[in-house]
Image (cartoon, coloured by chain):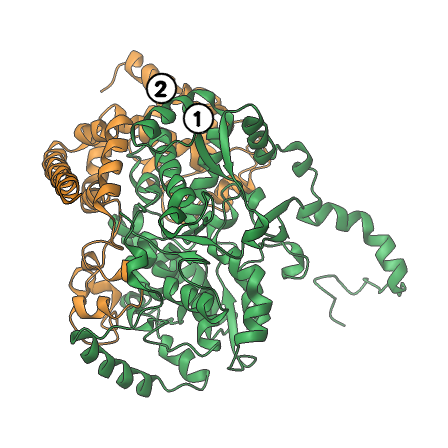
Chain colours: A green, B orange
Amino acid sequence: MSGIAGHGEFFQPTNLSAAEAEKATEWVKKRVDRRELDLGERMDDVREHMWQLEKEGEIIVHRISDAHKPAMVKTLFGWDKKIPTLQLWHHKSCGQCGNIPGYPTSLLWTMNQLGMQPGRDYLDETDQTSCTAWNYHGSGIGNVESLAAVFLRNFHQAYVSGKRMGHQPGHFFPLVHCGTSFGNYKEVRKYLVENATLRERVKKILGKLGRLVDGKIVIPEEIVHYSEWVHVMRKRIASELQKIDVSHLRTTVHMACHYSKMVHEDAIYDPEVLGGNRAAVGTSMAEALGAQVIDYSTWYDCCGFGFRHIISEREFTRSFTIERKIKVAQEEAKADVMLGIDTGCVTTMDKNQWIGRAHEQQYTMPIMADIQFAALACGADPFKIVQLQWHASPCEDVVEKMGLSWGESKKKFEAYLEEVKAGKIEYLYNPELALSA
Amino acid sequence: MATYAEMQEVFEDIRSDFRYDHELNGCLNCGICTATCPSAHFYDYSPREIVQLLWTENVEQVYDAMQEKIWACAQCMTCAARCPFKNSPGGLVAIMREVAIKHGFQSAKDVLRPFGRVMLKLITTGNQLSPDMIQPDHFPDWGPNIQKVEGDLKTLRKAIPMKTLQTTDTAWEVALKTSVEMYTIWEMTGVLKQLETMDENLFDVIEDFIEEKREEYDEMLEEQEEAK
């Protein structure tokens, strides 16, 4: 007789009742459930110090008010995090916008479908720079002061951005699209809260830019990643918008390192998703849509992006992503698609498959973001909205498996390109809203 | 070859960074950081080694590791999430890279040369990447299927239904005022100085570009003033 879960023949079932088993394993569960780890008790919640600084008149906290219709979630150690669902300022991502534009377009399309009104419920504008952290993590050029000044400049703009539409300061709350921006901003927030010298130095810069409010820097109450918005909206997206059954699709999820490993205490963990033991975002959207989410042994691994490596040491990036992600998702999980939640990961895994042929590693896997997959399931056009034409991986396969015709959609899109040339462009929002300065 | 005093100075620069005490708290030599490190799979690099060298204040070996090893780190921070001591080897590497640049290490210059295009884009536009940088010709290793619809880049970008994304030379449209604010940040935080140390030619190009953009911005303000 073969053993159970690796145990030998001597292993005997205990035949305990459910209640007895619960009692017997209570202590173990308490220890292994990451959210119960005592590490959380030993850690400072930087947000508490942030409120104290505001009380002392040092900073202004950009609040998530009732008008932002927040949803509460739990993070790694069971701490509460407030996720605004309305009045959002889109903090775009270099990689997404330059390379995977279907990521932000799917997000804005979903918001529109949920009845959100551009200019009131969200804003996408030109007064935003990159967080500059890709460059910093890749090259070491930049420093905490420059990262902090960029953080404060962008978030000050978010705070005042509603003014030209007649809204009060703080109307729009930043929603950060990029995983690295999200991780970087959380680190920078920590440094700003903990280090008075840094605050003083960047205050001079922000003062020169005219980016202080009553002589103070503005720090948002929470740093919020777009996938967290998707997470709290997943049930509405599935129940109100879903048109296509995806229950036959096998999905795998790649968790972005800079979402769950940088300032990891701030990532969302949900007892309903992956047993509450792994970050919930991404997976939760796929599950809400009814797709199968298949586990694989390298779930926790990085994608191989490497910041510097994807540009100047691509052999590392390619090798790692093929060996540790694409191959495993194909062979172990036999997945139809892999879903990411971050620009760098989606780019890395999407673009570095074909080159595997050079070493007879012919592994392929459609790669897209959770919100692109959700938009497809909700009836978004694979080209016009989900913009899959920019992906190198075989996304056409998963589109066909959803029952959509890639060929017909492509023909329609090619016809639309002729209209675009003639200046007939369809927008998700009035383009004048974007022109901020 | 650097003298011991020079190496000591480099080490002191690392140690005096205010993040140092956040990122280094002790080390059991358990090696979980290296076990989970993607770079350790492919390079002669170990986050455990970096932590140990710093923890034991091995000035010479720290200096040596800064020549090549620190550039292997992928900055994923898996090591930081795993460490029972709450160390961040990846965070320590970030500090070491900054110090390597401050001291103008030739090894840093060599490693960063291919990064020049991204740097130019970032410093001048406030974006790190643009659609015209990722055309099929530049990336033959991405395969023939990189663009699934034929068409010129300009038209394909115009077909993105967000106004801000209908650009080819930046990832999104950044207002002139925004870029000019960014230049002030670069100047006041010493980033342009870092750049000058690393690549004087690139610095000259960027300096000229910034000057031009500032003039353009001043003219725009004058025009706006006149229109009032």
Q: What element carries label 1?
A: helix
Of labels 1 and 2, earlier in sequence is: 2
Residue pointed to by mark 2: B13
The answer to whether any part of residue B65 appears in the image is no
Q: Which x, y percent locates residue A400?
A: 41, 84
For mark 2, name the chain: B
Q: Is B17 located above or below residue B80 in the figure?
A: above
**Relative to the observer, which residue lies in front, B177 or B19?**
B177
Residue pointed to by mark 1: B53
Q: Which x, y percent locates residue B111?
A: 23, 39
* Residue A267's disc number: none
Residue A93 appears left or right of A324: left
**Relative to the observer, which residue lies in front, B117 or A182?**
A182
Q: Which residue lies furthest to the front in this view?
A: B228
**Residue at image point 49% right, 33% down:** A60
Q: Quadrant of residue A46?
A: top right
Residue A119 appears left or right of A310: right
Q: What residue type is labelled 2?
A: Asp
Q: Tag 1: Cα neighbours inside 10 Å, few (<14), some, or many (≥20)?
A: some
Q: In which quarter of the image is residue A19?
A: bottom right
Name the image quarter holding the N terminus of chain A.
bottom right
Callouts 1 and 2 on one subunit: yes
Q: Which amino acid does label 1 sit on?
A: Leu
**Relative to the observer, which residue lies in front, A182 or B221?**
B221
**Residue at image point 63% right, 61% down:** A273
Q: Tag 2: Cα neighbours inside 10 Å, few (<14), some, or many (≥20)?
A: some
Q: Which x, y percent locates residue A185?
A: 44, 40
Q: Which x, y percent locates residue A85?
A: 53, 57
For mark 1, name the chain: B
**Relative to the observer, which residue lies in front, A97 or B202?**
A97
Q: What element carries label 2?
A: helix
